[in-house]
């Protein structure tokens, strides 16, 4: 449908996300989807503007794509996945005649570079190191625990292992024993090793324009890899001013003019904020859907206004609501993992079904009866969504789901 | 704790959230939001007051795209008889979808909603048919299986909800009409029909049904099964019935005999009492009441007089209260006069003496239980098949060719059917030849049907596994030949009487139409009496139909047999054909609705006006040895037919441009 506003920008979405395309198609700007060739027939059938591209390897052809998009009249490229972040950097460098953008995107793609850059910018980070093989991991595990004055036989404090170029919880392992080290597959190296921080982990979604935060959301993790909700509890929101400062530091340090970032932080027991990592793309775990449920604006459309160079400040002010007070309630989701080794069917627990906060789930009947052992954080079998007034009740409810069987 | 009212009003709020999301989504993204809506709908259905909420949102959900991308998106093409199955599926999302769809129909029927392709009357008619097919949920106590698949009694509540809003009046009438429509085709397998009549009977005794037109039609059906004569009008049970008839005088017995045969020939259904009566009358009285009990015409009476001993033996062995339909088969067999064909009598005598080999006996036992010896079941089935060849159906099995073959042989070549039954009875195998090479069915892998059918008649249960294998093997032996394998298989499989030319409308390699005008003209010249010099169809001819659904979309290829091309009472030419599918009355879309009665059809025939029939035909046999009538087929006939084909099954099969026809015979393209 040609309903776009010609005075506004023309955006390219890098990667295939039906939710993003749906949001773009309903929005007021011209867009084109840049995705692998397998999507072409689908796009043609559904009249979705499409350019076929294989993102597997960044190479000299990135300039070819950039030129093509420039000729097409595209103003900016928006990365939807980790794998397309540096493509967007390379393309936007050409479109906006700003070579710095490519280097910036490389920082987002390499967890080790990212951490060093943050450290240089005066941002507090935990102890970290790069690992190229299992020996590096073992050494780091030993050293961290020696520092903690552990004796032989004491249980080790865990360390975190994150494959360099994987996003979210994919490739994120918690390592406690030499056996855990042995279980790491070769293809997950190189990786970043981090000491474990006890504390409150949370994520931030920030829409940025003209080096200014246009909207900042704090997503409170109940348990990493299981559950998250927005807006956060008043206890965590109490730190909003400090969090905002931290994000401003990131904007300075990473030289971010516009776009969207998704960093993770730790608030330790002694009240210190530690930076975990940052991504220059939408988060997983349906965080944008939760934000939409709570605040009523579409996060992908938010991305488009934040990236589009032709967006005005008036438009941004009108688009984003007031943080926290602008929310209709708190929206959370829980990633369901089967807890039994053998399951035969999906059965949402009675108490969950009946809870007034429970909205719906996207779980399907089990395909196989036998549950494979989880590796790393693994992939959940689907999400259950909740919405309600009271953030504490929502948090406790999400926590309680971890002890329930959805698959029996 | 939350009360249940709160629960459904809270879920109503959630439903609003997820439906809004679905509404906003572009058509290509609808499917991402459908599961959430179905989840909430499913939970609402379990709550008191939930049905009202879903009903209130039904039209909105429809417009929002809840059914987008599924068959439910075209309500005008949905089949009411499938609803019950879906609700039994155990798949929560599917059940929620079906209920949402039913309530959408209800909203249209009651004027609370509209749909671009469906009027209130059509919606109401659909719901009425759904209710008729699911009558048992009103009257019967839930059985074990229901409790298992439907612990909340959802079906009962949904159907009750619908009845409360559209009334019960139409339902009985629709069901009765449906049963009569099926009975008009005189099926061999009457189990499903008997089941429906049983439900009507329960409904009429349980629920005060107003007397009226529906009541009359229903009464006839119920009485035909449970009490067709004065000695059994109160359904007294076999023992009491036998006592009563033993006390009757000759005129009383005469009345019983006529009452039974009238009910049987009216409906095609045989009461258990009728079977008991026939056995009793055949041995216990001096006067001969057999012709009246069987309701024979002159040919039948003549056959009976000539072969009285054999008929007595057949009754003794085949007829019992567990095999009542064999009475109807026997009556029609006698009336067809086929006993006068020399091989038939000795072949039946042979079958009376044949013991079944173990695997065949086991197959029949599996399908029909062991109340009656398998030999007797097979003989009862044989009588039905020979008496009602066009009453055969394939059951729920993908074996239309085998069912068609048995029907055509029974119609045309009855001694050949008996020959096959004998082979299978003795050795559980069939020997046929293909182009001179023997094919022994027991050596062959399974064909289209994975196992033996168990929902068909006894003859099919015995023969189909073998016929299916042989048919498949003949097809395999044609692999690599250019052209449609039916060209070689059909004559070899069925018999000399299949015409030797085979004309196909599509190019096998490309699937595109190939000289369609020539195809149509050839068929007109071969079969239409105005163009073939008035030659009637002598033997049934196998033919292939491109079956389309009620929206005229291509469904698949299907085997039928052309029986006659004649004029109906209005003088219009119609093609009368046999469809091995259990119910010939199908809507093939775009106004092409196969008729099964009222247009000159004989029992078991389906018919269509000539041009409509040809528009769905894709393969037929034609005799190459006839003289040319030199009558031209007017171009507009072929034009009209081609248009109908292109608007239905051949929509994607048009050859792009005439020039490209040149290469289309090359199998490599």
Image (cartoon, coloured by chain):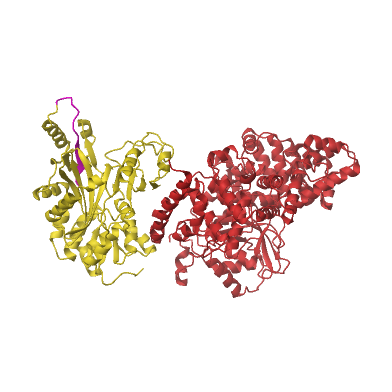
Chain colours: A yellow, B red
- Which residue is the extreme one toward the top? A153
Residue B511 location, x and y as percent?
48, 61
- Residue at 47% x, 59% y is B60
In the image, residue B646 above or below residue B31: below
- Residue at 59% x, 44% y is B438
Residue B264 location, x and y as percent?
77, 48
The C terminus of chain A - image quarter? top left
Residue B367 location, x and y as percent?
63, 39
Q: Is residue B61 left or right of residue A387?
A: right
Q: Is residue B208 left or right of residue B37?
A: right
In the image, which residues are magenta? A151-164
On the question of residue B153 being in view, the answer is yes
Is B595 in front, or is B622?
B595
Determine the image quadrant of residue A17: bottom left
In the image, residue A10 above or below residue B36: below
Determine the image quadrant of residue B519: bottom right
In the image, residue B592 above or below residue B313: below
Residue B28 location, x and y as percent?
39, 59
Is A305 in front, or is B652?
A305
Q: Main secondary structure of the magenta part?
A: loop
Q: Is residue B47 left or right of residue A363?
A: right
Is B648 in front, or is A11?
A11
**Total numbered circles:** 0
């Amino acid at each position: 449908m040609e309903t776009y506003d010609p005075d506004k920008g023309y955006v390219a979405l890098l990667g295939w996300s039906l939710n993003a395309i749906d949001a773009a198609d309903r929005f007021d700007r011209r867009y084109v989807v840049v995705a692998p060739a397998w999507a072409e027939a689908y796009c043609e059938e559904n009249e979705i503007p499409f350019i076929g591209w294989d993102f597997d390897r960044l190479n000299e052809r990135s300039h070819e794509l950039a030129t093509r998009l420039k000729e097409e009249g595209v103003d900016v490229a928006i990365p939807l996945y980790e794998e397309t972040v540096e493509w967007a950097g390379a393309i936007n460098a050409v479109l906006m005649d700003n070579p710095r953008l490519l280097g910036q995107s490389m920082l987002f793609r390499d967890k080790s570079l990212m951490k060093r850059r943050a450290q240089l910018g005066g941002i507090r980070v935990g102890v970290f190191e790069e690992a190229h093989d299992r020996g590096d991991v073992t050494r780091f595990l030993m050293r961290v625990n020696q520092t903690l004055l552990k004796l032989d036989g004491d249980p080790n404090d865990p360390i975190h292992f994150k494959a360099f170029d994987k996003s979210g919880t994919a490739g994120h392992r918690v390592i406690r024993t030499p056996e855990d080290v042995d279980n790491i597959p070769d293809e997950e190296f190189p990786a970043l090793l981090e000491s474990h921080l006890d504390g409150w982990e949370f994520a931030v979604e920030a829409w940025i324009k003209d080096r200014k935060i246009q909207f900042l959301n704090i997503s409170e993790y109940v348990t990493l890899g299981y559950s998250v909700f927005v807006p956060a509890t008043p206890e965590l929101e109490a730190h909003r001013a400090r969090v905002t400062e931290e994000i401003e530091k990131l904007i300075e340090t990473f030289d971010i003019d516009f776009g969207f970032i998704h960093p993770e932080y730790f608030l330790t027991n002694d009240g210190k904020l530690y930076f975990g990592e940052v991504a220059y793309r939408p988060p997983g775990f349906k965080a944008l859907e939760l934000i939409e449920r709570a605040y009523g604006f579409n996060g992908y459309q938010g991305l488009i206004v934040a990236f589009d160079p032709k967006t005005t400040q008036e438009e941004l002010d009108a688009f984003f609501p007031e943080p926290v007070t602008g929310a209709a309630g708190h929206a959370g989701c829980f990633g369901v993992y089967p807890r039994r080794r053998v399951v035969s069917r999906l059965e949402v627990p009675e108490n969950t079904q009946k809870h007034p906060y429970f909205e719906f789930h996207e779980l399907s009947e089990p395909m196989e009866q036998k549950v494979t052992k989880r590796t790393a954080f693994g992939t959940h079998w689907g999400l259950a969504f909740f919405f309600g007034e009271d953030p504490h009740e929502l948090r406790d409810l999400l926590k309680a789901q971890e002890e329930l069987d959805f698959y029996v | 704790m939350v009360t249940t009212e709160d629960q459904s009003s809270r879920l109503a709020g959630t439903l609003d959230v997820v439906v809004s999301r679905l509404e906003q989504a572009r058509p290509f993204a609808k499917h991402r939001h459908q599961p959430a809506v179905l989840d909430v709908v499913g939970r609402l259905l379990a709550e008191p007051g939930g049905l009202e909420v879903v009903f209130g949102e039904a039209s909105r959900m429809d417009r929002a795209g809840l059914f987008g991308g599924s068959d439910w998106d075209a309500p005008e093409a949905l089949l009411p008889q499938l609803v019950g199955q879906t609700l039994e599926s155990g798949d929560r999302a599917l059940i929620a979808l079906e209920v949402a769809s039913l309530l959408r129909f209800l909203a249209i029927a009651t004027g609370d909603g509209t749909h671009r392709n469906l009027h209130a009357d059509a919606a109401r008619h659909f719901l009425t048919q759904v209710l008729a097919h699911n009558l048992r949920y009103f009257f019967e106590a839930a059985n074990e299986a229901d409790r298992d698949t439907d612990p909340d009694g959802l079906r009962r509540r949904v159907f009750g909800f619908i009845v409360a809003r559209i009334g019960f009046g139409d339902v009985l009438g629709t069901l009765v009409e449906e049963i009569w429509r099926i009975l008009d085709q005189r099926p061999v397998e009457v189990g499903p029909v008997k089941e429906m009549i049983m439900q009507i009977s329960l409904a009429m005794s349980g629920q005060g049904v107003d007397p009226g037109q529906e009541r009359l039609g229903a009464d006839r059906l119920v009485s035909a099964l449970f009490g067709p004569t004065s000695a059994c009008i109160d359904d007294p049970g076999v023992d009491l019935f036998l006592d009563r008839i033993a006390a009757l005088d000759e005129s009383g017995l005469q009345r019983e005999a006529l009452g039974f045969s009238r009910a049987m020939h009216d409906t095609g259904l045989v009461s258990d009492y009728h079977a008991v009566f026939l056995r009793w009358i055949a041995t216990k009285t001096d006067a001969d009441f057999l012709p009246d009990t069987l309701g024979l015409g002159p040919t039948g009476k003549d056959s009976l007089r000539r072969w009285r001993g054999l008929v007595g033996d057949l009754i003794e062995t085949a007829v019992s209260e567990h095999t009542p339909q064999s009475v109807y088969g026997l009556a029609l067999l006698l009336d067809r006069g086929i006993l006068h064909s020399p091989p038939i009598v000795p072949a039946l005598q042979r079958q009376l003496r044949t013991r079944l080999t173990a695997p065949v006996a086991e197959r029949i036992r599996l399908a029909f239980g062991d109340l009656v010896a398998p030999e007797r079941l097979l003989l009862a089935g044989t009588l039905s098949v020979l008496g009602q060849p066009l009453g055969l159906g394939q059951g729920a099995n993908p074996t239309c060719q085998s069912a068609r073959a048995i029907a055509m042989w029974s119609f045309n070549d009855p001694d050949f059917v008996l020959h096959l039954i004998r082979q299978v009875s003795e050795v559980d195998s069939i020997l046929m030849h293909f182009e001179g090479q023997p094919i022994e069915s027991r050596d062959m892998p399974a064909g289209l049907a994975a196992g033996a059918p168990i929902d068909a008649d006894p003859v099919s249960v015995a023969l189909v596994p073998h016929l299916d294998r042989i048919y498949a093997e003949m097809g395999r032996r044609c692999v690599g030949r250019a052209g449609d394998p039916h060209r070689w298989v059909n004559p070899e499989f069925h018999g000399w009487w299949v015409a030797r030319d085979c004309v196909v409308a599509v190019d096998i390699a490309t699937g595109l139409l190939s000289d369609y005008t020539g195809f149509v003209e050839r068929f007109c010249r071969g079969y239409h009496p105005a163009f073939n010099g008035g030659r009637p169809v002598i033997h049934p001819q196998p033919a292939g139909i491109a079956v389309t659904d009620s929206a005229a979309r291509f469904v698949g290829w299907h085997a039928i047999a052309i029986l006659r091309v004649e004029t109906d009472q209005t003088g219009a030419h119609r093609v009368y054909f046999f469809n091995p599918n259990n119910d010939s009355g199908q809507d093939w879309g775009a106004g092409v609705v196969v008729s099964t009665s009222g247009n000159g059809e004989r029992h078991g025939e389906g018919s269509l006006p000539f041009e409509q029939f040809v528009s769905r035909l894709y393969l037929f046999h034609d005799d190459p040895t006839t003289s040319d009538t030199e009558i031209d087929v007017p171009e507009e006939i072929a034009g009209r037919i081609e248009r109908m084909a292109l608007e239905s099954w051949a929509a994607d099969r048009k050859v792009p441009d005439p020039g490209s026809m040149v290469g289309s015979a090359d199998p490599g393209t």
